[in-house]
């Protein structure tokens, strides 16, 4: 019978719905393979789905599905499932005659509004938990349901999945190998699998069968539909199937399934004995899916649906294959509330009962005490990255510390987050971007080279290799032990090369036998001599290596596999690493620090280290920083740090003593400025710089009226707030002070005047304010503006505006101040200072943030004339301004910009980034404007009517943070993403930024 010839029209469907079910609605066809499905829309109701089956459909099976749905409806109020709509004659399954005279079964079910799981982007862990929870809940209800039709033989029943063995030749060689691997392992497990508990289960929670709510900010899984595969089978199969589909198109399959398993377990407790089967069962569903798709593609090569279901299944198989089976099992256990490693408790009980001492491990080291050495990412002892990469220096520091603690072994490190590993070699890409392996799983003992290490218990050598790479183990030996029926391993890393070459795999060692000798750099993986000692309850699939550091998101599992080695020694100095919690820090802040002090992000981050364009948090997680224009030449730039440290060690006093540092900094700055601006005053912050500039204005002009832009920000002091519309304007704020005169934000995109050539119009607005001042019988003091208005939303001043405005202001006797606190010092790329973009020379320039690269130093540059007039008033004294330490730092910042050609870099990378952002805007029309200069850029998000989109902007910044990229938002409507990174930002950084922006712009919320 060729079913495809027959069509059922929407009119026929509407008629069926009305005649059989008395439902009057509008029918819309839904895609179906052989059956006919129609959505029946009914005014003010969710409506229905009308299902019309092929003539030979098994009516009994349909009745079984109806009974199941009725059972669910009766038994669990919390679970949403399609509801059975009875025909007017009371039947659950009805019948019609089609145009060919065939009898066809018909059902009407309630429609569950929403979208399908596969359509949700992103599929968050919360959503995955909800998916698992919903599936688990359904199984839980069905535990009490029984039906003879549930006992049928299905090729989609995982326990039967070995039929796929006849078809492996359909795949390419890589996939064939993978599929055979899974089939063979599943076959080996099959007798145990058959014995697992059973129930009636849905058996097909694929991404097209799970309905998710329409909510874009907090989507939830609502219900499973399509009960055509329900079957009485192993419960774990149902979970495996859900996992198999959830990992499609996800980068990290293991991280994807864990919240799902956790959710499933929360409503339907999984048994410990079921979990060892989950990994291969999940794989087998992918094998079944890919195999049947391929078989059907052979029959119907044009069928796009089949092709589109094949590719993700094949990719998922490859990625699942790359997951270590045992590690997956331990992770599943952890997700279900069991100890990740099954032997964890047993091992701990044994180890706690038995005492070992360090003298047994190091018999030649005659020291009883331990001095804890903190090498964590926030350790001040390890200091600057430059220092800990200098092995001679590191050795020197170790020796000094040893000398200070002659009776102690220096040791520590269990669960320490280490920045030594935060180099990119230890990164991988997960579902949310880069992840770094940073958490140390062993204890390090810092002892002299050639110190012998002895076995603490009898054991067998299972790995003896030389791992020569940088920051690898060097000589590595792993012993296997079996004590009181507990199998475990001990790892000895950073041994000499000879230690490993002298050992044979399979060799037996007795307690007290020598395992090896400590190596030194470079042969031990390029470390200062020490032993990395680690315990493992499983070797996993490692043959020549074993991780000594773990990814943070897998830590709970690794902790269980690799217990603290100190469990043997019971030494109080060797406890697992612990850091102050966020909660503690926040509670103190709330109570004792300024109440207006805000924090970035819903879950605030504790940053402990900076490095170039990166910030590193307490866990060693590296964030690409596109926000911090203070760390201008890169966070903790070694030359700048050194300049500060060196001078700090000599003297720091006020500027009333002679010192060349202050002159040197002045010279460096003057070199960058127009010749007119050749007098400098040094202060400690941008606010102080602007405060001083306004004082200079008053003494120079005798006037106090200041003209400033709307949404401008110039600092936090009284005077600065008074000229900062960003602070005084707006609901509940004090409004414009008497002596301040604001003109409209010169925003050619969404401001008062829009488009090209608005410079003259905005300059006229400045002129209007001059007239206002004159109307009050007062004179103009100054006009202050940033060359690109940062808080205003990275607003580039329209062409010609500044030159024109300066003419008006000067004609009125006022001074012109350029606030370069954000824009200065080469960030603009094309020019060193922002005002230079506009071909003007201000009377006063204020300089702040970048000058100290994080150290509080700022400056005011002015003309001789302004300086002379100012000096005639009260003496200006500033305790800290211009001190030798600050000046050494400022000078080094300016020299670094020159030496490393960072202005040129800002130009090159900034132009590239702006170009790429403009390309992005072509794909995502909510990017209304891309603007800025050099590495001072902004993108403004608006809807089609030019309304601002602050929620999307905020969402974007938060999601980028989830992907380890820091971004900030600003502008009067908070709808501008600002990009102003340290100017060491590279092309690769720009590409990475664009890659993740593209990813997040495609997420559902952005279409809200
Ligand atoms: C343009 C501008 N001027 C002045 C300041 C004030 O600088 P500080 O915070 O160093 O006092 C800021 C600070 O954000 C600023 O952006």
Image (cartoon, helix red, strand yellow):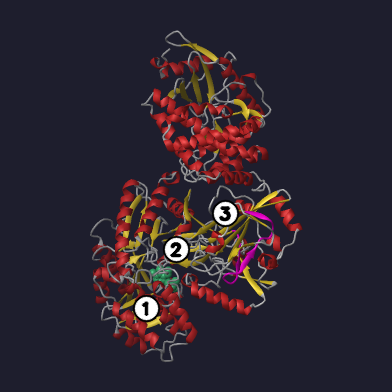
Instruction: Evaluate if marks 2 and 3 touch, with contact meaning CB atoms under 8 Å apart.
Output: no
Secondary structure category for the residue under label 2: strand
From the top left corner, tell me how far across and down residue 872 is, in percent. 36, 90
Looking at this rendering, what residue extends furthest in the top direction? 101
Q: Earlier in the sequence, mark 3 or mark 1?
A: 3
When the figure is inspected, residue 16 is found, relative to residue 916, above or below; the finding is: above
Query: Which label lies toward us, 3 or 1?
Result: 3
- Whether residue 777 sits left or right of residue 418 in the image: it is left
| Residue 463 badge | 3
Secondary structure category for the residue under label 1: loop
- Confirm if mark 1 falls within 8 A of ligand 1: no
Q: Give the range drawn in magenta.
A: 441-460
Measure the C-alpha gap from mark 3 to mark 1.
79 Å
Q: Is residue 449 magenta?
A: yes
When the figure is inspected, residue 806 is found, relative to residue 992, above or below; the finding is: below
From the top left corner, tell me how far across and down residue 823 is, in percent. 35, 69
From the top left corner, tell me how far across and down residue 615 is, in percent. 47, 64
- Confirm if mark 2 falls within 8 A of ligand 1: no
Secondary structure category for the residue under label 3: strand
| Residue 704 badge | 1
| Mark 1 Cα-neighbour bin, 10 Å: few <14, some 14–19, many ≥20 | some
Give the residue pinned by disc 2.
Answer: 614
């Amino acid at each position: 019978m060729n079913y495809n010839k027959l069509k059922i029209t929407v009119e026929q469907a509407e008629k069926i719905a009305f005649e059989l079910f008395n439902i009057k609605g509008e029918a819309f066809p839904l895609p179906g393979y052989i059956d006919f499905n129609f959505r029946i829309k009914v005014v003010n109701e969710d409506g229905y789905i009308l299902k019309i089956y092929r003539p030979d459909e098994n009516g009994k099976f349909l009745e079984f599905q109806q009974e199941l749905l009725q059972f669910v409806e009766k038994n669990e109020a919390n679970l949403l499932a399609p509801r059975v709509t009875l025909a007017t004659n009371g039947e659950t399954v009805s019948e019609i005659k089609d145009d060919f005279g065939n009898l066809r079964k018909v059902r009407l079910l309630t429609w569950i509004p929403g979208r399908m799981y596969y359509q949700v982007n992103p599929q968050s862990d919360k959503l995955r938990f909800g998916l698992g929870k919903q599936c688990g809940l359904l199984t839980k209800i069905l535990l009490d349901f029984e039906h003879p039709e549930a006992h049928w033989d299905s090729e989609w029943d995982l326990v039967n999945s070995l039929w796929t063995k006849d078809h492996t030749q359909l795949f390419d060689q890589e996939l064939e190998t993978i599929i055979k691997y899974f089939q063979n392992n599943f076959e080996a497990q099959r007798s145990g699998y058959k014995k697992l508990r059973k129930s009636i289960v849905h058996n097909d929670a694929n991404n097209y069968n799970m309905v998710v709510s329409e909510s874009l900010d907090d989507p939830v899984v609502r219900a499973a539909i399509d009960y055509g595969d329900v079957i009485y089978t192993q419960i774990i199969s149902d979970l495996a199937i859900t996992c198999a589909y959830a990992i499609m198109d996800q980068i990290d399959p293991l991280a994807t399934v864990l919240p799902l398993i956790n959710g499933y377990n929360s409503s339907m407790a999984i048994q410990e004995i079921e979990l060892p089967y989950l990994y291969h069962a999940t794989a087998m569903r992918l094998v079944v899916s890919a195999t049947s798709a391929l078989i059907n593609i052979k029959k119907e090569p044009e069928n796009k649906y089949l092709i589109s279901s094949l590719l993700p299944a094949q990719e998922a198989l490859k990625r699942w294959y790359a997951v270590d089976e045992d590690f997956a099992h331990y992770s599943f256990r952890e997700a279900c509330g069991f100890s990740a490693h099954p032997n964890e408790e047993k091992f701990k009980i044994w180890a706690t009962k038995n005492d070992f001492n360090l003298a047994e491990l190091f018999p030649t080291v005659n020291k009883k005490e331990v001095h804890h050495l903190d090498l964590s990412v926030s350790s001040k002892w390890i200091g600057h990255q430059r220092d800990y990469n200098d092995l001679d220096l590191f050795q020197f520091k170790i020796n000094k510390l040893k000398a200070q603690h002659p009776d102690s072994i220096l040791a520590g490190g269990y669960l320490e987050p280490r920045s030594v590993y935060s180099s990119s070699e230890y990164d991988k890409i997960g579902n949310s971007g880069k992840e770094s392996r940073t958490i140390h799983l062993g204890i390090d003992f810092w002892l002299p080279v050639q110190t012998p290490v002895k076995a603490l218990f009898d054991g067998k050598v299972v790995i003896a290799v030389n791992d020569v790479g940088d920051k690898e183990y060097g000589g590595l030996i792993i012993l296997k032990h079996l004590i009181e029926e507990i199998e475990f391993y001990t790892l000895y890393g950073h041994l000499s090369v000879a230690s490993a070459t002298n050992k044979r795999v399979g060799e037996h060692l007795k307690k007290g036998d020598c395992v090896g000798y400590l190596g030194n750099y470079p042969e031990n993986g390029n470390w200062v001599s020490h032993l990395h000692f680690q315990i493992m309850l499983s070797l996993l699939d490692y043959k020549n290596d074993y991780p000594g550091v773990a990814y943070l998101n897998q830590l709970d599992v690794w902790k269980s596999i690799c217990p603290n080695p100190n469990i043997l020694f019971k030494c109080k100095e060797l406890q697992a690493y612990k850091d102050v919690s966020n909660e503690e820090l926040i509670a103190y802040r709330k109570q004792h620090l300024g109440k207006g002090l805000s924090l970035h992000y819903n879950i605030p981050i504790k940053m402990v280290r900076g490095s170039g364009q990166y910030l590193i948090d307490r866990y060693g997680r590296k964030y690409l920083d596109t926000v911090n224009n203070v760390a201008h030449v890169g966070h903790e730039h070694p030359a700048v740090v050194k300049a500060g440290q060196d001078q700090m060690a000599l003297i720091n006093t006020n500027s009333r003593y002679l010192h060349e540092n202050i002159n040197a900094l002045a010279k460096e700055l003057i070199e960058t400025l127009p010749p007119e601006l050749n007098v400098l005053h040094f202060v400690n912050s941008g606010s102080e710089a602007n405060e001083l500039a306004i004082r200079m204005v008053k003494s120079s002009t005798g006037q106090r009226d200041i003209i400033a832009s709307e949404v401008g920000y110039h600092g936090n002091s009284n005077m600065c707030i008074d000229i900062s519309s960003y602070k005084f304007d707006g609901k509940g704020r004090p409004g414009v002070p008497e002596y301040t005169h604001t003109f409209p934000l010169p925003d050619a995109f969404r401001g008062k005047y829009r488009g090209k050539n608005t410079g003259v119009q905005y300059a006229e607005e400045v002129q209007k304010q001059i007239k206002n001042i004159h109307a009050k019988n007062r004179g103009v003091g100054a006009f202050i503006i940033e060359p690109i208005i940062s808080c205003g939303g990275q607003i580039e001043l329209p062409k010609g505006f500044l030159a024109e405005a300066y003419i008006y202001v000067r004609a009125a006797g006022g001074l012109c101040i350029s606030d370069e606190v954000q824009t200065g010092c080469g960030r603009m790329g094309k020019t060193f200072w922002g005002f230079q973009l506009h071909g003007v020379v201000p009377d006063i320039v204020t300089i702040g943030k970048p000058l100290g690269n994080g150290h509080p130093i700022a400056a005011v540059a002015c003309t001789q004339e302004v300086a002379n007039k100012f000096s005639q008033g009260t003496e200006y004294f500033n305790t800290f301004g211009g001190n030798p330490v600050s000046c050494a730092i400022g000078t080094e910042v300016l020299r670094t910009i020159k030496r490393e050609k960072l202005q040129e870099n800002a130009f090159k990378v900034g132009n590239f980034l702006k170009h790429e952002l403009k390309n992005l805007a072509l794909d995502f029309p909510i990017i209304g404007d891309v603007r800025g200069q050099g590495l001072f850029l902004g993108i403004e998000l608006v809807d089609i009517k030019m309304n601002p989109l602050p929620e999307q902007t905020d969402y974007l910044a938060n999601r980028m943070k989830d992907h380890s990229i820091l971004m900030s938002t600003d502008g009067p409507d908070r709808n501008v993403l600002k990009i102003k990174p340290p100017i060491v930002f590279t092309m690769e950084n720009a590409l990475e930024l664009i890659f993740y922006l593209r990813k997040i712009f495609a997420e559902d919320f952005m279409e809200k």
